[in-house]
Amino acid sequence: MSAIRLARAFTGRSKIVKFDGCYHGHVDGLLVRAGSSVATLSLPDSPGVPSGFAAETLVAPFNDMSALEFLFREEADSIAAVIVEPVCGNMGVIPPESGFLPALRKLTREHSAVLIFDEVITGFRLARGGAQELYEVEADLTCLGKVLGGGLPLGAFGGRKEIMDLLAPEGPVYQAGTLSGNPLAVAAGLATLKELSRMRAYQELEQKGRKIQEGFQSVLRGHRIKGVINRVGSMLTLFFGVERVSNADEARRCDKDRFARFFHGMLSRGIYWPPSPFEAAFLSLSHKTTDIAKTIDAFDAWARKELKG
């Protein structure tokens, strides 16, 4: 919310571009074709959001540069910012296709629009520098949350100096919060970052992610079950009934009934998977090799029973 307010003040424009299926919190103007629980419940919007708010939000399919270029041809003088999850985690995990993020960076720069990366999920999870380090693309503003507080409530946004200088008390753009600068959350976050710097965290998470992905793929092949695993680092999603998922429309075509059976089958075998195909699964440094092996074995046992009917 604050990053978007800042982008509007910096550009003097009002419209925001988001991507179908991306979720950026429950601020009114962004609950338009959102992901997360909105996607799970098949709600395109939320009652209580004035139509005038929604009219300031333009929507494009993720990974579709031609659609984005069309929006800029039509609305360039009105577009203040593009906000995106650089790796989607709220319609299931959907990685950016090769060249998508650099092209997005180039397009926004050409039209003097602010590029906002929502790294609430990807920040400190994919790399110490988030998705921007992993994909070597730098946003104008970055939103962080959750992990930033080391388990305690904390959120932050930051970016280019000339944009941030507009923020009060340096500039006229208002921002406030009851917990702003909360010392306990900041201390916990700093301690977590020091630990991540000390450990080989991201190499280990990549190895664990690859191991569970390869195990799941082996089960799908072995039982001839149609599905695809989308993964980036320690983030992954299993989509049933489809062979490719690169945007929200393709995610919605997955077999949700089979996923529900999978969820309950895994739960009965001691594995608590996210209960929706539109929520990402996350591996952590706490997961051991034996945990991953148990998860793959549970999937294999469920698949055998599923095919027997």
Image (spheres, rainbow, N blue to C red):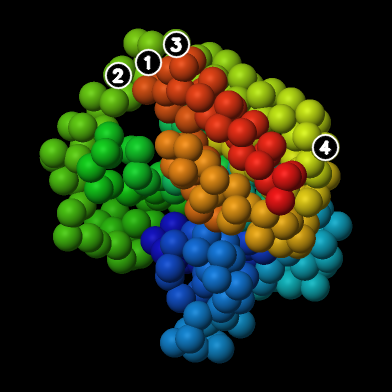
Residue that badge 4 annotates: 224
**Disc 1 designates what residue?**
197
Residue 293 placement (x, y as % from top left): 54, 20
Q: Secondary structure at mark 2?
A: helix
Q: Quadrant of residue 113?
A: bottom right
Residue hosting label 3: 200
| Residue 258 numbered tag | none
The amino acid pointed to by label 2 is Lys
**Image label count:** 4
Identified at 78% across, 34% down, the residue is: 223
CB contact under 8 Å: marks 2 and 1: yes
> What distance separates the C-alpha of mark 3 from that of mark 2?
12 Å
Relative image position of residue 128 (x, y in whole percent): 46, 25
- Identify the secondary structure beneath mark 1: helix
Q: Which residue is mark 2?
A: 194
Identity of the amino acid at label 4? Arg
Q: Secondary structure at mark 3?
A: loop
Q: Nearer the viewer, mark 2 or mark 4?
A: 4
192 up-or-down from 85: above or below: above
The Cα atoms of the two marked residues, 1 and 3, are separated by 8 Å
